[in-house]
Every structure is written in C-alpha cells, then in structure tokens.
Amino acid sequence: MVKVAVNGAGSWGTALAVLLAQAGYSVTLIGRRSEEVEEMGRRRENARYLPGVMFPPDLQVTTDLAALNADLVVFSIPSHGVREAARLASPHLRAQTLIVNTAKGLEEGSHKRLSQVLTEELPGHPVVVLSGPSHAEEVGLNMPTTVVAAGELTTAQRVQDLFMTPRFRVYTNPDLVGVELGGALKNVIALCTGIAEGLGYGDNTKAALMTRGLAEIARLGTAMGGDPLTFAGLAGVGDLIVTCTSRHSRNRRAGVALGEGKPLDLVLSEVGMVVEGVRTTRVAHELARLKGIAMPIVEEAFQVLFAGADPKAAVSNLMERGKRHELEEVAAVRLQREAVKRV
C-alpha cells in the first residue's frame, strides 16, 4: 500500500488527505497545533478549516513529523512557510520520496517559485506541482473537479495516477513555470475583482479585470519562461475564474472587504486564513519592475494594499490610461508587416 503524508492541516491539505484516504492509500495528515490535531482525531473532521467533511476511518492525524517517512509527501503549507517546512521535513524523508506542492504563491525576497524552494531544500527529491480550479470545500464534498500536475512528465504522470479518481480528474503539463505563475498571480486579480465588488461595481467591471488580468499574468509568465498556452488552461484561466467568482475564495472575500473600506490588517484578521494574493502582489510588483513589464492592475493593487491608495481612484487610473491595442504583440506584428509592404 502506498504510504502518504499530507503536511499541513488547513482546508486544502485536509481535503486532499480525505481524497487520498478514500482512494485506498495509507494517509497521515500532519498538523502543527496539538490541541487542534487532538480535536480532529476525536471529532473525525477538521471543524475549523473544513467543517462537515468527515474523515475516512483509516485517515490518521498527528503532529509528529516522523510520519513524513512516506512514499508521497504533499506540502499544503502557505507559501511563506514552505522553505522552513521543507527544512524541518528533510531529515524524515525517504531517499526517493515524491514531493507534491499545492501552495500557490512566490517566495518574498528571492522571487522564487515554490518548486524552486523545495528543490533547493530537498535535493534529490522529485517535485510536482498540483494546481488548477479546486476549492477544498468542494473537493471535500466529492464534487467533480479537474486539476493539473506539472513537472517532469514521467513524474507528473505518477502523480496523475496517484490522485486520479472518478470525481477528481488530473491532467499533466510539463510547463512547471507557467503552471506555478498562473496559480500564484491569479490571487492578485481575485483581490482586485473582490475590491470592485466591494465598491459596488458589477459584472462588466469584474469581467474586465479578469480578462485584462489574465493578459498581465501571461505577459509576466511568458517573460519568465512559461508557455503562453498554459495560461489558457486549468492553471491559468480556469483557476482565475474560480478564484475571482467563488464564495469560497478567501482572496475575493478579502478584496470585497477592502473595497468596502476596511483596513488591510482588519480584513486579514476577519478572513482568518492566509490570503496569498497579498504577499504575491508585492512579489509580482517587484518582478514587473525588474523585468520592465507593464502590469497596471498589479501596480494599482500594490498601491491600494501597501501605499494607502483609494480603491476608487485605482479603478479610475486603470480606466483613464492612454489608448492601447487589446493584443499589443499581435498589433505590433501587423503594423510591422504593413510597414514592410509600403516599402
């Protein structure tokens, strides 16, 4: 029997532990706080993060990192804790333990993708990223969901085989860069669509933010080595849609509160879980400037979150920008062709 450890007992880690236990594997869910783990073991559910989803009989819960001695270890840790979690896990892993990362973010300071962080801290262990439109609340209730496993193709196919169920469909994608950046950057746009909703704007505004936000994601993603087609897939537009529109989305929910005028510290406290888009906004803003890439929505998000800018003024700044082509790259090529014809 395949032995699995899920490191991180938040909503997503819990949902995946339940999924894998239902698939017949020997699964241990590892939490940090002993009182919460004891309560989960007693109630057979994660009442704080995933209420109503009951644990299969064989699912174990513990705080003991020795459980990381497994065939497969799933990291379901917030992005800012991934490096430290990997360092703590390292002594307990088997020589060929397969690592799957589910967090969607970028490391502050280094600007590194989380697979790069894990590879640095856990050399010799294959790393695959699981991403796509997949709210824990729905996966825990066994609702049909599709995701993508990204990494070296043979290894990604191993993850596909391990995670695939009749209600959880897994595709593979060798474009690790594009999948990770799509998953991280969509949280920034979800914050922005939430802000628009909190300001009282409607579907037109949110659709505009999502569409132009996807253009910014693809612009930075391809500049960093991602495949443009990835951003039209599950980890791109798929994850963007669900995060910008779902009642389960903590990034959207935080954005709504910001748009209603609440300060950021209070918003984060009220959400009660990590809002990845806040940290990712800072990293994306720094990357855009370093690479000279135009990301006006990210720029305005940064100003609202970290410089005290008025959200309504941010919307006006976006709407009143100078005239642009929708597809700048396509327009540039066509203008160049026309110029050649005239010569």
Image (tube, rainbow, N blue to C red):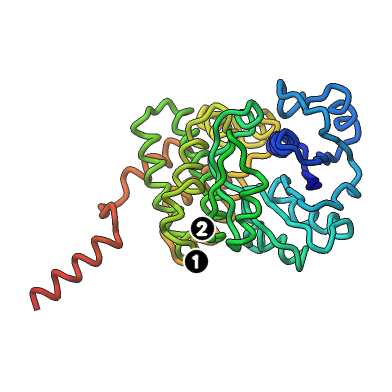
Residue position marked by numbered label 1 in the rendering = 225
Residue drawn at x 30%, y 62% is 329
Viewer-proximal residue among 129 and 120: 129
If the image is split into quadrants, where does the N terminus sit? top right
Viewer-proximal residue among 277 and 166: 166
Residue position marked by numbered label 2 in the rendering = 178
- Mark 1 burial class by Cα count in 10 Å: few <14, some 14-19, many 20+: few
Q: Which mark is residue 281?
A: none
In this view, the residue farthest toward the front is 1
Percent coordinates x, y for residue 185 in the rendering: 53, 50
In this view, the residue farthest toward the bottom is 343
Q: Quadrant of residue 179?
A: bottom right
Check if mark 2's residue and mark 1's residue have beta carbons within 8 Å: yes
Residue drawn at x 68%, y 51% is 101
Q: Quadrant of residue 169?
A: top right
Percent coordinates x, y for residue 318 in the rendering: 37, 45
Side of 129 where 241 appears, left or right: left
Vertical comparison of 15 with 328: above or below: above
Vertical comparison of 208 with 68: above or below: above
